[in-house]
Image (cartoon, rainbow, N blue to C red):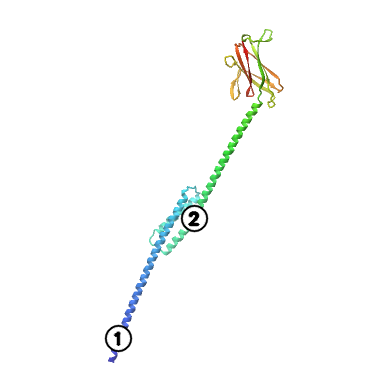
Amino acid sequence: MMENQPGQSQKKNSNVIYFLIAVVVALLGTDVYLYMQKNKSDTKIVYQNDEKTRLQTELDSLEAQIEQVNIGRTKMSAEMQAKNDSLRATIKVLRKKLAKGQLTAAELGKAQEDIKQLRYFVTKYTADIEELKKQNTNLTVERDTLKTNLANVSTKAATLEKQNQELDTKVKEASALKVGVASVVAYKVKNSGKEVEEKKAKNTQKIKINFTVASNTVAEKGLHDVYARIIDPTGNLITLADSGTFNADNQDLQYTYKTAIDFKDDGSGYTIDWAYSPFQKGTYTVILYADGYTMGKTSFFLK
Protein backbone atom coordinates (compact mmCIF):
# COMPACT_ATOMS: atom_id res chain seq x y z
CA MET A 1 0.00 0.00 0.00
CA MET A 2 2.72 2.47 0.88
CA GLU A 3 4.48 1.84 -2.44
CA ASN A 4 1.55 3.25 -4.50
CA GLN A 5 1.37 6.70 -2.77
CA PRO A 6 4.00 8.55 -4.89
CA GLY A 7 2.23 7.63 -8.11
CA GLN A 8 -1.09 8.83 -6.83
CA SER A 9 0.40 12.16 -5.72
CA GLN A 10 1.94 12.69 -9.11
CA LYS A 11 -1.42 11.99 -10.81
CA LYS A 12 -3.17 14.52 -8.61
CA ASN A 13 -0.63 17.20 -9.51
CA SER A 14 -1.15 16.54 -13.19
CA ASN A 15 -4.94 17.03 -12.83
CA VAL A 16 -4.42 20.32 -11.10
CA ILE A 17 -2.16 21.54 -13.86
CA TYR A 18 -4.70 20.53 -16.50
CA PHE A 19 -7.44 22.32 -14.62
CA LEU A 20 -5.37 25.49 -14.33
CA ILE A 21 -4.57 25.36 -18.03
CA ALA A 22 -8.27 25.00 -18.84
CA VAL A 23 -9.08 27.96 -16.63
CA VAL A 24 -6.41 30.07 -18.30
CA VAL A 25 -7.63 29.06 -21.74
CA ALA A 26 -11.21 29.92 -20.76
CA LEU A 27 -10.15 33.27 -19.42
CA LEU A 28 -8.19 34.00 -22.57
CA GLY A 29 -11.16 32.99 -24.69
CA THR A 30 -13.43 35.29 -22.69
CA ASP A 31 -10.99 38.19 -23.13
CA VAL A 32 -10.75 37.54 -26.84
CA TYR A 33 -14.54 37.39 -27.13
CA LEU A 34 -15.00 40.61 -25.16
CA TYR A 35 -12.28 42.33 -27.21
CA MET A 36 -13.88 41.26 -30.45
CA GLN A 37 -17.30 42.35 -29.24
CA LYS A 38 -15.88 45.72 -28.23
CA ASN A 39 -14.22 46.13 -31.62
CA LYS A 40 -17.45 45.13 -33.30
CA SER A 41 -19.38 47.68 -31.23
CA ASP A 42 -16.82 50.40 -31.93
CA THR A 43 -16.96 49.57 -35.62
CA LYS A 44 -20.74 49.78 -35.51
CA ILE A 45 -20.64 53.17 -33.79
CA VAL A 46 -18.07 54.47 -36.26
CA TYR A 47 -20.21 53.16 -39.12
CA GLN A 48 -23.29 54.81 -37.70
CA ASN A 49 -21.45 58.09 -37.24
CA ASP A 50 -20.06 57.94 -40.77
CA GLU A 51 -23.50 57.12 -42.19
CA LYS A 52 -25.07 59.95 -40.17
CA THR A 53 -22.48 62.37 -41.56
CA ARG A 54 -23.13 61.13 -45.09
CA LEU A 55 -26.87 61.57 -44.64
CA GLN A 56 -26.38 65.09 -43.25
CA THR A 57 -24.24 65.92 -46.28
CA GLU A 58 -26.96 64.60 -48.58
CA LEU A 59 -29.54 66.75 -46.79
CA ASP A 60 -27.27 69.76 -47.37
CA SER A 61 -27.12 68.84 -51.06
CA LEU A 62 -30.90 68.45 -51.31
CA GLU A 63 -31.54 71.76 -49.58
CA ALA A 64 -28.99 73.47 -51.85
CA GLN A 65 -30.76 71.96 -54.86
CA ILE A 66 -34.12 73.35 -53.71
CA GLU A 67 -32.54 76.76 -53.09
CA GLN A 68 -30.92 76.73 -56.53
CA VAL A 69 -34.27 75.97 -58.14
CA ASN A 70 -35.86 78.91 -56.33
CA ILE A 71 -33.11 81.36 -57.32
CA GLY A 72 -34.80 81.81 -60.70
CA ARG A 73 -37.76 83.37 -58.84
CA THR A 74 -40.16 81.50 -61.06
CA LYS A 75 -43.71 82.35 -60.08
CA MET A 76 -44.96 79.09 -58.54
CA SER A 77 -48.49 77.83 -58.33
CA ALA A 78 -50.05 77.32 -54.91
CA GLU A 79 -49.52 73.56 -55.30
CA MET A 80 -45.81 73.98 -56.04
CA GLN A 81 -45.36 76.45 -53.20
CA ALA A 82 -46.98 73.92 -50.83
CA LYS A 83 -44.64 71.20 -52.11
CA ASN A 84 -41.67 73.51 -51.63
CA ASP A 85 -42.68 74.21 -48.03
CA SER A 86 -43.30 70.49 -47.40
CA LEU A 87 -39.83 69.51 -48.68
CA ARG A 88 -38.16 72.12 -46.49
CA ALA A 89 -40.16 70.92 -43.47
CA THR A 90 -39.16 67.29 -44.15
CA ILE A 91 -35.48 68.27 -44.31
CA LYS A 92 -35.84 70.11 -41.02
CA VAL A 93 -37.35 67.04 -39.33
CA LEU A 94 -34.60 64.75 -40.69
CA ARG A 95 -31.94 67.15 -39.46
CA LYS A 96 -33.39 66.95 -35.97
CA LYS A 97 -33.33 63.15 -36.12
CA LEU A 98 -29.72 63.07 -37.27
CA ALA A 99 -28.77 65.65 -34.65
CA LYS A 100 -29.64 63.13 -31.92
CA GLY A 101 -26.97 61.01 -30.28
CA GLN A 102 -26.18 57.56 -31.53
CA LEU A 103 -28.95 56.27 -33.73
CA THR A 104 -30.20 52.74 -33.47
CA ALA A 105 -29.98 50.56 -36.53
CA ALA A 106 -33.74 50.91 -37.00
CA GLU A 107 -33.60 54.73 -36.70
CA LEU A 108 -30.67 54.90 -39.08
CA GLY A 109 -32.48 52.70 -41.57
CA LYS A 110 -35.61 54.85 -41.28
CA ALA A 111 -33.56 58.01 -41.87
CA GLN A 112 -31.94 56.42 -44.92
CA GLU A 113 -35.35 55.50 -46.34
CA ASP A 114 -36.76 58.98 -45.60
CA ILE A 115 -33.85 60.67 -47.37
CA LYS A 116 -34.21 58.28 -50.29
CA GLN A 117 -37.85 59.28 -50.62
CA LEU A 118 -36.90 62.93 -50.17
CA ARG A 119 -34.34 62.64 -52.97
CA TYR A 120 -37.11 61.37 -55.27
CA PHE A 121 -39.48 64.19 -54.36
CA VAL A 122 -36.77 66.87 -54.72
CA THR A 123 -35.86 65.49 -58.15
CA LYS A 124 -39.54 65.50 -59.15
CA TYR A 125 -40.00 68.98 -57.74
CA THR A 126 -36.94 70.25 -59.61
CA ALA A 127 -38.26 68.77 -62.84
CA ASP A 128 -41.67 70.43 -62.25
CA ILE A 129 -40.02 73.82 -61.66
CA GLU A 130 -37.89 73.47 -64.78
CA GLU A 131 -41.00 72.59 -66.77
CA LEU A 132 -42.73 75.66 -65.33
CA LYS A 133 -39.76 77.82 -66.32
CA LYS A 134 -39.90 76.33 -69.81
CA GLN A 135 -43.62 77.04 -70.04
CA ASN A 136 -43.06 80.60 -68.80
CA THR A 137 -40.30 81.05 -71.39
CA ASN A 138 -42.60 79.75 -74.11
CA LEU A 139 -45.37 82.05 -72.92
CA THR A 140 -42.95 84.98 -72.92
CA VAL A 141 -41.88 84.14 -76.47
CA GLU A 142 -45.51 83.82 -77.53
CA ARG A 143 -46.36 87.12 -75.82
CA ASP A 144 -43.42 88.88 -77.49
CA THR A 145 -44.38 87.32 -80.82
CA LEU A 146 -47.95 88.52 -80.38
CA LYS A 147 -46.68 91.99 -79.46
CA THR A 148 -44.46 92.00 -82.55
CA ASN A 149 -47.30 90.78 -84.74
CA LEU A 150 -49.63 93.37 -83.22
CA ALA A 151 -47.03 96.07 -83.78
CA ASN A 152 -46.61 94.91 -87.38
CA VAL A 153 -50.38 94.87 -87.88
CA SER A 154 -50.66 98.33 -86.32
CA THR A 155 -47.84 99.58 -88.52
CA LYS A 156 -49.48 98.09 -91.60
CA ALA A 157 -52.84 99.52 -90.57
CA ALA A 158 -51.26 102.94 -90.02
CA THR A 159 -49.48 102.65 -93.37
CA LEU A 160 -52.71 101.67 -95.12
CA GLU A 161 -54.59 104.47 -93.40
CA LYS A 162 -51.90 106.93 -94.47
CA GLN A 163 -52.01 105.55 -98.01
CA ASN A 164 -55.80 105.78 -98.01
CA GLN A 165 -55.61 109.35 -96.78
CA GLU A 166 -53.03 110.17 -99.42
CA LEU A 167 -55.15 108.46 -102.06
CA ASP A 168 -58.25 110.25 -100.82
CA THR A 169 -56.35 113.53 -100.96
CA LYS A 170 -55.17 112.78 -104.48
CA VAL A 171 -58.70 111.86 -105.55
CA LYS A 172 -60.11 115.06 -104.01
CA GLU A 173 -57.37 117.12 -105.57
CA ALA A 174 -57.86 115.43 -108.93
CA SER A 175 -61.61 115.98 -108.79
CA ALA A 176 -61.28 119.66 -107.79
CA LEU A 177 -62.19 122.19 -110.47
CA LYS A 178 -59.35 124.13 -112.04
CA VAL A 179 -59.46 127.34 -114.07
CA GLY A 180 -58.80 127.00 -117.78
CA VAL A 181 -58.45 130.67 -118.72
CA ALA A 182 -59.44 133.73 -116.69
CA SER A 183 -59.61 137.49 -117.15
CA VAL A 184 -61.07 140.47 -115.30
CA VAL A 185 -62.80 143.45 -116.90
CA ALA A 186 -63.71 146.68 -115.03
CA TYR A 187 -66.97 148.51 -115.74
CA LYS A 188 -68.81 151.69 -114.97
CA VAL A 189 -72.61 151.72 -114.97
CA LYS A 190 -74.42 154.55 -116.76
CA ASN A 191 -77.68 156.05 -115.56
CA SER A 192 -79.45 153.98 -118.15
CA GLY A 193 -78.03 150.86 -116.52
CA LYS A 194 -75.76 150.10 -119.41
CA GLU A 195 -72.34 148.73 -118.46
CA VAL A 196 -69.28 150.23 -120.12
CA GLU A 197 -65.71 148.98 -119.82
CA GLU A 198 -63.56 151.28 -117.69
CA LYS A 199 -59.81 151.64 -117.14
CA LYS A 200 -59.80 154.34 -114.50
CA ALA A 201 -60.12 153.39 -110.86
CA LYS A 202 -62.22 156.40 -109.89
CA ASN A 203 -64.89 155.53 -112.50
CA THR A 204 -64.97 151.79 -111.89
CA GLN A 205 -68.07 150.54 -110.11
CA LYS A 206 -67.89 146.80 -110.70
CA ILE A 207 -65.75 144.07 -112.19
CA LYS A 208 -66.56 140.90 -114.08
CA ILE A 209 -64.38 137.85 -113.53
CA ASN A 210 -64.61 135.71 -116.65
CA PHE A 211 -63.20 132.16 -116.58
CA THR A 212 -63.54 128.69 -118.00
CA VAL A 213 -63.03 125.41 -116.15
CA ALA A 214 -60.51 122.88 -117.40
CA SER A 215 -61.96 119.54 -118.49
CA ASN A 216 -62.11 117.09 -115.60
CA THR A 217 -63.70 113.67 -116.08
CA VAL A 218 -63.45 112.72 -112.39
CA ALA A 219 -65.00 115.95 -111.09
CA GLU A 220 -68.57 115.74 -109.94
CA LYS A 221 -70.98 117.33 -112.36
CA GLY A 222 -73.40 119.81 -110.85
CA LEU A 223 -73.16 122.82 -108.54
CA HIS A 224 -69.78 123.74 -107.04
CA ASP A 225 -69.20 126.59 -104.60
CA VAL A 226 -66.64 129.10 -105.82
CA TYR A 227 -64.88 131.56 -103.51
CA ALA A 228 -63.14 134.70 -104.73
CA ARG A 229 -60.42 136.51 -102.80
CA ILE A 230 -59.58 139.94 -104.21
CA ILE A 231 -56.34 141.57 -103.05
CA ASP A 232 -56.06 145.36 -103.49
CA PRO A 233 -52.89 147.15 -104.73
CA THR A 234 -51.66 147.58 -101.14
CA GLY A 235 -51.79 143.81 -100.54
CA ASN A 236 -54.88 143.82 -98.33
CA LEU A 237 -57.80 141.44 -98.78
CA ILE A 238 -60.99 143.26 -99.71
CA THR A 239 -63.83 142.09 -97.45
CA LEU A 240 -67.43 143.13 -96.99
CA ALA A 241 -69.82 142.85 -94.09
CA ASP A 242 -71.12 139.50 -95.33
CA SER A 243 -67.67 138.02 -96.08
CA GLY A 244 -67.26 134.69 -94.34
CA THR A 245 -64.58 131.99 -94.15
CA PHE A 246 -63.88 128.72 -95.92
CA ASN A 247 -61.18 126.05 -95.95
CA ALA A 248 -58.85 125.52 -98.87
CA ASP A 249 -55.34 124.11 -99.21
CA ASN A 250 -55.52 122.94 -95.56
CA GLN A 251 -56.07 126.41 -94.13
CA ASP A 252 -59.01 128.58 -93.11
CA LEU A 253 -59.38 131.67 -95.29
CA GLN A 254 -61.71 134.64 -95.51
CA TYR A 255 -63.33 135.27 -98.84
CA THR A 256 -64.31 138.47 -100.64
CA TYR A 257 -67.19 136.99 -102.55
CA LYS A 258 -68.94 133.62 -102.77
CA THR A 259 -71.05 132.15 -105.57
CA ALA A 260 -71.75 128.81 -107.25
CA ILE A 261 -71.39 127.45 -110.77
CA ASP A 262 -73.05 124.53 -112.56
CA PHE A 263 -70.20 122.38 -113.84
CA LYS A 264 -71.03 120.21 -116.86
CA ASP A 265 -67.52 119.57 -118.17
CA ASP A 266 -68.50 120.97 -121.55
CA GLY A 267 -66.09 123.90 -121.76
CA SER A 268 -68.73 126.47 -120.71
CA GLY A 269 -67.58 129.91 -119.59
CA TYR A 270 -68.58 131.51 -116.30
CA THR A 271 -68.78 135.10 -115.11
CA ILE A 272 -68.74 136.48 -111.58
CA ASP A 273 -70.15 140.02 -111.26
CA TRP A 274 -68.84 141.91 -108.26
CA ALA A 275 -69.84 145.49 -107.49
CA TYR A 276 -67.54 147.55 -105.33
CA SER A 277 -66.55 151.18 -104.77
CA PRO A 278 -64.28 152.94 -104.47
CA PHE A 279 -61.46 151.29 -106.35
CA GLN A 280 -57.95 152.68 -106.12
CA LYS A 281 -55.21 152.85 -108.69
CA GLY A 282 -52.94 149.84 -109.06
CA THR A 283 -52.91 146.12 -109.72
CA TYR A 284 -55.49 143.85 -108.16
CA THR A 285 -55.09 140.10 -107.75
CA VAL A 286 -58.06 137.75 -108.00
CA ILE A 287 -57.76 134.18 -106.65
CA LEU A 288 -60.53 131.62 -107.17
CA TYR A 289 -61.10 128.52 -105.01
CA ALA A 290 -63.35 125.47 -105.33
CA ASP A 291 -63.62 122.02 -103.73
CA GLY A 292 -61.02 122.86 -101.06
CA TYR A 293 -58.27 123.84 -103.49
CA THR A 294 -57.08 126.84 -105.45
CA MET A 295 -58.75 126.97 -108.88
CA GLY A 296 -56.49 129.58 -110.32
CA LYS A 297 -55.76 133.28 -110.26
CA THR A 298 -55.55 136.33 -112.48
CA SER A 299 -55.08 140.09 -112.08
CA PHE A 300 -56.18 143.42 -113.51
CA PHE A 301 -54.88 146.96 -113.46
CA LEU A 302 -56.73 150.25 -112.89
CA LYS A 303 -55.10 153.59 -113.60
Q: Residue furthest bottom?
A: 1
Q: Report how far apart the C-alphas of labels 1 and 2 lie in the structure.
A: 81 Å
Report the residue marked by disc 1: 10
Q: Look at the numbered disc 1 and give the secondary structure of its residue.
A: helix
Q: Position of residue 171 (x, y in %)?
A: 65, 28
Which picture quadrant has residue 186?
top right
Within 10 Å of the Cα at label 2, are there few (<14), some (14-19), or many (20+) other Cα atoms? some
Is the residue 219 above or below the residue 277 in the image? Answer: below
Residue 170 relative to residue 44: left or right:
right
The circle drawn on residue 232 is none
Q: For this rendering, which residue is in front, 201 or 80?
A: 201
Residue 222 relative to residue 62: left or right:
right
Amino acid type, mark 2: Thr
User: Can residue 103 be spotted in the picture?
Assistant: no
User: Can residue 66 be spotted in the picture?
Assistant: yes
Q: Residue at x 47, y 50 (%)?
A: 70
Which picture quadrant has residue 221?
top right
Q: Position of residue 189 (x, y in %)?
A: 66, 9
Report the residue marked by disc 2: 123
